[in-house]
Amino acid sequence: MTDWQASPLIDDAVIASLFELGGAEDPGLFRELVALYLADTPRLLQALEESSQVADGGGLERAAHTLKSSSANMGAARLSALCKTLEARARSRQFDEVPSLVAEARETFGRVVDALMSKTDAA
Amino acid sequence: MLGKQLDELRMTGCLPSPTGVGLTILELTRGEDYSLGDLAQAIQVDPALTSRIIKLANSSLKQGVESARTVQDAAMRLGVRTVRSIALGFSLVNNNRAGKCRTFDYDAYWARAIARGVITQALSAETRLGIPAEGFTLGLLCEIGYLALASIHPEAYADLLLKDGAQDPTRLRELEQQAFSIDHAELSAGMMRDWKLPEAFAWAVCAYAVDTPLDSAPSKMARDWAFLLRGSMMFTNPGLLSTLDGSPTSSAPSVTDVAERMNVPVETLPALLRRTMGEWREWGKLLRIPTTTFPNLSVPPKPMPAEPLAESKPENATSVAAGDSERKGLRILAVDDDPVALRLLVHHLTRDGHEVCQATNGSEALKMALEQSPQMLISDWMMPEMDGLEVCKALRRTVPGMAIYVLIVAGREDESRIVEAFDAGSDDYVSKPFNPRILLARVRAGQRMIELREKVELDHDERQRQMSRMAVLNRKFESQAMTDALTQLPNRRYAMDRLDQEFANSMRGKSKLSVAVIDIDHFKQVNDQYGHDIGDLVLRETAKVLKDTIRRGDVVCRMGGEEFLVISPDSDLAGCAATAERIRAAVSEHVIGFRLGRSITVSLGVAERTANVPSVDELLRIADRRVYSAKSQGRNRVCLTSEEGPSPGQVA
């Protein structure tokens, strides 16, 4: 078991702090952040897949880096950790496990979407 | 009543006024006797104004015309009056960009003033009722009373602008009268009088917005200006503007209506409107005033809503008032390719009172930074294509980009390379994911730097303005200090300075230099016998004859009393003697034999600088001795030799 598998799908502390951030002034902030994240991530996943197919280390590293930080911001801890692993592999040009990691990322994102949507419904 | 009100307001020292170069130029151009050179000299002191004027002169350049490189070129091309308006407007805008009146929208005020300026200018040209450049000045300043009230009574005026009826021109003036015993229109008029703008302006700004019949105007000019200002109100009616886009509204005056009332051909109107809107945007850029929606000049300026922050957080009101009320937010450009991170960044910054624009990639950021000159740029380091450091490097190669404080947001893994960020020209960095408190603390640290830098620049500007004022004063003072008040000839001080220069030149260049000392004969008797008035008259008349008789290139000065000096560069003794003889003859023929029963004559001593004459003093001493010889030989003569030998040395 690698580190990313040990991370929770969603870090509830981050979600709570995002709710708190908007507070009474900006109650729609959380919903807005979720929308931004959900809209931007498919592009990054596609970039991951394309770079992985042609073994483009640079492209893979950049996309993984961005998805790592935006996922961390949204409390998607497991996806963030997974991207961190991908980023490290890309940097050291170890591509053997990359396609399966990318597939894992897409699948994890699907579950993140469900989780975040249920949080916004609760809000 | 009004005079007293205005006096009191003046005493507060809070009335908006042009300073520095603007003031200098206003003072310089009050009379008619200023030259393009004087004007150019005053402008050159301010580099920002200089570049704007040159840019403006070249902006409408026709092909084949050489571009203006100096202020003088530009002023010649634009015309002195236009340059004056620009300088006045520029200095007023610069000094009154922001202020303490919280519901007064300073940017919108200036956008409005500029709009009024360009429209009044265009209408003046179209109707031929006024000089276009004067129309610009009138339009620009015709609502200056609003700004003045906001400056003098920031608190009371902020409340007044929110009252019912403040959006109605007549009602607003009533409210102002109740609160301050003076209204914005009267104040505008009073300030225009203070600035010695045409009296017709003052009448027009009081009359145009209310139903004053234009026939009651004191002059045709006053009537015409009021008429043009009314035209500017009709022109900016949003209904009329929307008819341009092909979406007419029923309540709007039709284009035909307006054209008829303004007496301009209806087919020229749409083009005229579009042109003025374009000019308005250009001016906005030039003066850095945002120009988004063309203002509606037929109603008073809209107040800004009261600050939302103070309302929504009443529990913090005391601490805000105690600590942060003075702290203004920064204009920040935030850049990140990750939309979530960008949104969070913007959220934190906005909540801390900053005004934030955003960009999602490097090249967009660079473009926005150069267009909008934010005070601070906060950029993510890692971005595809152009990253944060590249943006920073590119900015630092430009003049406006150098002034921007750059804060780089670096991932933890980039920290080992943080030196690169500083090498690229960034001022500071924060690590991400950032702790909002640390981010805001870093921004505040940057803000202190920015404010310090801006203060230094302001001081620098102010010093430059003072220097320009001094330069103009000195020039005036110099010319006064160097001129003899009675005869208007250059005085002894000037003569000695000039002679020093000419003497040095002649030594260096081995060129010739001669002088003639001239003394009026029996002047003391004239004074005693006829009084000082006649004595002064004799001096003035003699001075005039001297001025008319000397050669080109010669200078004649009054050395004091009844003694004059002609400095004659490039003349040898014979040449100067010929001039001296012409003077002697002219004085005895022309000067004031009138009713004195005697003719006025002069005695002259001429001397040339030769190898034996080591100094200016020596040269003058020789000439003086020869005047003495001329006197002792019977006066009314020219003497070329000193009375050492027995020879009379007399010419003619």
Image (spheres, rainbow, N blue to C red):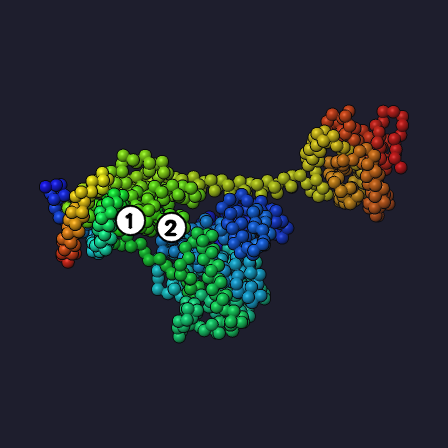
The structure residue drawn at horizontal position 41% and vertical position 68%, both measured from the top left corner, is B245
Dot 1 amino acid type: Asp
The structure residue drawn at horizontal position 22% and vertical position 47%, both measured from the top left corner, is A52
Nearer the N terminus, badge 1 or badge 2?
A: 1
| Disc number lying in front (1 or 2) | 1
- Quarter assignment of residue A88: top left
Residue B529 location in percent, x, y? 81, 41
Real-space CA distance between mark 1 and mark 2, rounded to the nearest whole angstrom: 15 Å
Residue with the mark numbered 2:
B368
Residue with the mark numbered 1:
B337
Circle 2 residues within 10 Å: few <14, some 14–19, many ≥20: some
Residue B488 location in percent, x, y? 71, 43
The structure residue drawn at horizontal position 55% and vertical position 66%, both measured from the top left corner, is B126
Discs 1 and 2 lie in a common subunit: yes
Compared to residue B256, the image places residue B514 above or below, namely above
Going by the image, does B27 lie left or right of B555? Answer: left
Going by the image, does B190 lie left or right of B391? Answer: right
Circle 1 residues within 10 Å: few <14, some 14–19, many ≥20: many
CB contact under 8 Å: marks 1 and 2: no
Residue B187 is at least partly visible in this image = no
Compared to residue B643, the image places residue B468 above or below, namely below
- Quarter assignment of residue B132: bottom right
Q: Classify the position of the C terminus of chain B by image quarter.
A: top right
The chain holding disc 1 is: B
Dot 2 amino acid type: Met
Residue B460 location in percent, x, y? 47, 40
User: Camera-side residue: B411 or B209?
Assistant: B411
The structure residue drawn at horizontal position 36% and vertical position 50%, both measured from the top left corner, is B364
Residue A52 is at least partly visible in this image = yes
Q: Label 1: state its secondary structure.
A: loop
- Quarter assignment of residue B468: top right
Going by the image, does B473 lie left or right of B391? Answer: right
